[in-house]
Amino acid sequence: MSLQIVHPVPEDFWWNVARQCAYATFYHTPLWQNIALHSFLVTYQDATFGAILANGTRVVFPIIATRTIGPFRWLHSTFENCYGGFIADGPVNDDEAAVLYQHACRISTYTLYAIDNPFDAPLPKPIQSRLQEVYTEPTYLVHLDADFDAIMARFSRARRTAYRRGLKKGVEVRQMRSLDEMVIYYESYRDAIERWGEATGYGYPWHLFEHIYYLSRAYPEQIKIWVMIVNKQIAGGRMIFYWNKVASLWHGASHRDFLEYDVMPVGDTEIIRDALDHGYRYFDFNTSGNKEGVMTYKERFGTETRPVTMWRFANPFLQPVQQIYWKATGKR
């Protein structure tokens, strides 16, 4: 089959495809790759490739390499198990899609983890047959297809009550204004980690938050960091990524001192209102790591669930060699 592989992918090529692809998400843009590579300079390498099909359609397959040994690579599409797969500015048939995945899973690929994109069609069966299903979990979407009152009427009674109660307690929501405010948001996140009972080293490092903050100043339409305010104090925050009519929640946290104020229901509801006012079609709560409490919280916003599967390609030739190496050396 005739197609031209593009590697490395020029940034303008990537941006143009992302802008013209109906199912591209923020996690398919150069910005998400930028966050991964600049926040984890030693950990990740760019393994993205592009293609030009016989019909002229341009394709980008965002990928990061999490490990390399010589020519062999351990790959993820995409960073932090967010929506992956390829994007294109025109039609891609099943045979062409199979060739693209064959290129991603070529002989030098030890493993490839690829995450479904809930805004695209499911992977064609021939591709699924080459991959292993690791897990499936739902993402949670609020449809922004009516006025705010009608959307809020779909919320559970408990969610509407929590929102109104939080407003009465004085919770305010606005966008972040300074790096100092990001420091307070990060402190709220570390407090939440302690509250969850996680180890001290668990979670994202400060330099990731700092980098996202500076990107939010350079790309204010794509990255908005919201804070919830109680008594003129920052009680927590939300990172929302915007692309292609989807406002996607990626990260959020609140400090234990403000939990009684219902800051999260107020924050999420007002962010949903803002997305509606700016013409977005969906507010995406994202996946939840199958954590029951988090899933229940999202369900109460009247969300639609869509399945998201992580797929894994395991190289049938390299895996046995690796097993022999591990046994011989005791190294993993």
Image (cartoon, grey):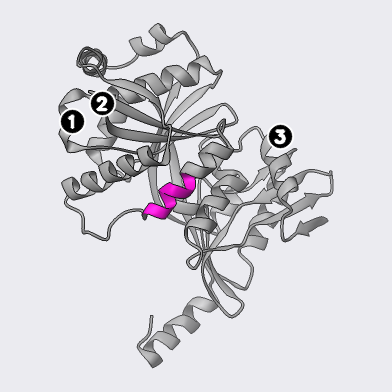
Residue at image coords 32%, 29%:
298
From this viewpoint, is residue 239 visible?
A: yes
Residue type at the position of mark 1:
Leu
Please state which of residues 189 and 296 is positioned toward the viewer in this rendering. 189
Find numbered disc 1 in the image and state the secondary structure of the residue it sits on. Answer: helix
Q: Residue at x 21, y 59 (%)?
A: 199
- The part of the chain drawn in magenta is 206-212
- Looking at the rendered image, the quarter that the N terminus falls into is bottom right
Which dot marks residue 259?
A: 1
Residue at 31 percent of width and 54 percent of height: 203
Q: Is residue 162 magenta?
A: no
Q: Amino acid at mark 3?
A: Gln
Mark 1 touches mark 2? (CB < 8 Å): yes
Q: How many marks?
A: 3
Sequence order check, earlier mark of 2 and 3 = 3
Question: On residue 20, which mark appears?
Answer: 3
Residue 105 image position (x, y, % from top left): 60, 64
The residue lying toward the viewer, choosing from 29 and 5, is: 29
Q: Is residue 210 magenta?
A: yes
Q: CA distance from mark 1 to mark 2?
A: 7 Å
Q: Callout 1: few (<14), some (14-19), or many (20+) C-alpha neighbours within 10 Å?
A: few
Point 48% across, 56% down: residue: 39
Instruction: Specify the principal SS of the magenta part.
Output: helix
Closer to the camera in the image, 170 or 285: 170
